[in-house]
Image: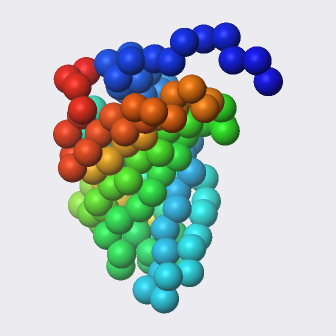
Amino acid sequence: MTITQPPRDTASRIRDVLARLDEEQDVWVSTADTAGAPYLVPLSFLWDGTHLWLCTRIGNPTGRNLSDGGRARLALGHTRDVVVLDGEVETYGPKEVPTEVADGFHAKTGWDPRGSGPAYHWFRVRPTAVEAWCEEPELVGRHIMRDGAWVEAP
C-alpha cells in the first residue's frame, strides 16, 4: 500500500462527511439488544442536514434495538475511507414521520416505506460523535464531532 495524499485538515474532513451524507444512499447500522448482543445491517438513509433518517420494521432486531436502546453506531465507506457516527435515536411510527422526510427518503432511495405496511417505523438519528479518516495517516485528528458539535465549523 502506498499512501500519496497528505492528511486532510478537520474542515476538509467535515466538508467531505457532509457531502457523503448528502450523496450516499446506504449506511451500516450497528445496534445491540438489552443483553448486549450486537447486530449489524445496511439500511438506506436520508440526511436532512441535522439528522439521519432510517426506516425498517419495528419487529426485527434492528428496529427493536433502535427503539429500545435509543442509540446506534453508523458507518459509511470502506476500510480506507471511513466515517463512523454515534448517535441518539428517536422512533417515529408510520403516521408520525414528517411528510417532507418520507418524501425525501423516497426521492433519494427510490423506496417509499409508507406503502410497505404499518410494521415499518422511522428512526431519527442525531449524531453525537463523528470520526473520519482515510488510512493510517489520518488516524490523528479523526474525531471531527464531539458531544453533538463539530470540532470546527463546517
Please give left or right for residue 146 compared with residue 38 in the image: left
Q: Quadrant of residue 11?
A: top left
Quadrant where the C terminus sits is: top left
Residue pictured at 45% horizontal, 57% vertical: 73
Out of 30 and 67, give the one closest to the viewer.
30
Residue pictured at 66% horizontal, 37% vertical: 78
Out of 58 and 141, give the one closest to the viewer.
141
Rendering colour mode? rainbow
Please give left or right for residue 52 compared with residue 58 in the image: left
Residue pictured at 20% horizontal, 23% vertical: 153
On the image, the x and y values in percent for residue 81 come to 60, 30
Tag count = 0
Q: Residue furthest bottom?
A: 35
Please give left or right for residue 79 compared with residue 12 in the image: right
Q: Quadrant of residue 41?
A: bottom right
The answer to whether residue 26 of the structure is visible from this angle is yes
Out of 153 and 62, give the one closest to the viewer.
153
Out of 29 and 54, give the one closest to the viewer.
29
Residue pictured at 24% horizontal, 32% vertical: 151
On the image, the x and y values in percent for residue 42 come to 60, 53
On the image, the x and y values in percent for residue 74 come to 48, 51
Q: Which residue lies furthest to the right in this view?
A: 1
Q: Quadrant of residue 3?
A: top right
